[in-house]
Image: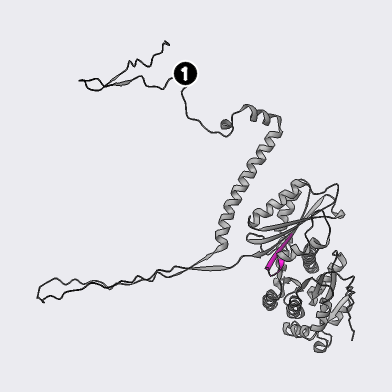
Amino acid sequence: MANFKVELPKERSSIIKVIGVGGGGGNAVNYMYKEGITGVDFVICNTDCQALETSSVPNKIQIGNELTNGRGAGSNPEVGKKAAECSIDEIADILGVNTQMVFITAGMGGGTGTGAAPVIARIAKEMGILTVGIVTLPFSFEGSKRILAAEKGIIEMKESVDSLLVISNDRIIEIYGKLLLSEAFNYADNVLATAAKGIAEIITVAGSLNVDFEDVKTAMQNSGVAILGNGVAEGEGRALIAAQEALNSPLLNDNKIEGAQNLLINITSKKGEGELTMDEYSQINNFFQEQAGFDANLKCGVCFDESLDGKISVTVIATSFNRTENTLKTEVPETQFENNFKVEQTEKSEKFSEKIETDDVKYMSLEEDIPFKKEDIKREVNKIKNLEYTSRLKELRELNQKSKSENGREELENTPAYERKNIKLDEVSHSSESNVSRFSLVDEPERKPELKSNNSFLHDNVD
């Protein structure tokens, strides 16, 4: 039986580690290791001895050796969970080497990944490490049993991590159409790698505008479910196209980032020729701010990659979505009456009267629960703000373009503003035309008041 040992010297170990758990997570980390992610340590963790032996990743942990005898978990998450619990010391040892942030990636639905990943995440979080889970949902063709197991595993992961990214494999098919079976699974590995690379290199790759570890920690710590997207574009309008593509990324189950409290953006381009411009930087930031809402905290980093040539790459991470619902209770104060009236008794007398029958009075309670969502109110306010901002931005851009052209400058200089804006003015008499009444009210003694047109104080002839 092979004995796997992890050797991570503290002085050379990265503060960021990527741990692939189970078959799916291990395949993803193998792919990341070959592709390369700057400034991270890779670790694979499995019950299957054979899968560990064939991997080129140097750091390996075999969990539950005594439980499974080096074989897999047999698609049983309980076996995977117990295997991780049997190897807590080995897991804690590798996490204890200079680790400040860990990515735990796994394919949900199997045995080892589904069962062991939440245990490893819980150990990391209890050690005070920023813990991010990146997991995939199975393809629909893998069967309902596997999908149900995956959903249960995701619930356990949510309780064990600071932030969780869930990637649907079916979305890959939706976007890229007909893929070969091998291509579909390889693409899933690529998507996982892109997610981990997108977050890690925000911290590890130096650039002109850096987002440091504390910025990422603020955005992702205890943030719940997060979404991440990546887009690449070149040519005219590349900045806005790349930003839009990031929201159409297969990394996102839902392409809406509205309601996110924190946004992390990383923009990568080649330095020098093809480098990001200030105008492009502004376009990308404004686009995501409009999409998330103007209350979102946005942090944007800029770095360089010489392999991009004229392309631009945009990665967005949205966290801390406000999903809570409140109940509004309408309380009606109880009215109390004081009976201070004294009623004097009178002699009874028999009188005939008509008996009036009335229906029973039915009382209705005024107390009711009216559910409402805070984010719905905020969403409407943000929509109004977005419309006002977009309208004003469009107006300024048109004015700026007009002022740059010769015909536009002439129009601005020679045409009154009210004509340019199609504002109709009320007809006003020329200054030479008098609006002063020539009638005067005469009130003489012993005569009735009367109006006279020959006002002696108003005459065309100058004295």
Classify 10 Å Cα crowding around label 1: few (below 14), some (14-19), many (20 and above): few
- Quarter the N terminus occupies: bottom right
> Is 184 or 30 nearer to us in this picture?
30
Question: Looking at the image, can residue 284 be seen?
Answer: yes
Q: Position of residue 172 (x, y in %)?
A: 73, 64
Q: Is residue 221 magenta?
A: yes
* Residue 135 rendering spot, x and y as whole percentages: 74, 71
Q: Quick check: 71 above or below 400?
A: below
Q: Is residue 378 left or right of residue 289?
A: left
Q: Name the element at disc 1.
A: loop
Residue at the extreme front: 445
What residue is drawn where x is 67% and y is 31%?
Answer: 408
Name the residue rendered at 67%, 78% in the picture: 152
Q: In this rendering, does residue 178 appear at all?
A: no
Which colour assignment does the render follow? Answer: one colour
**Quadrant where the image shows the C terminus:** top left
Tell me which secondary structure the magenta stretch mostly adopts.
strand
Residue beneath the point at 74% across and 46% down: 279
> Which residues fall within the magenta stretch?
220-229
Judge by depth and name the residue closer to the eye, 211 or 337.
Answer: 337
Q: Is residue 259 left or right of residue 448?
A: right
Residue under numbered circle 1: 432
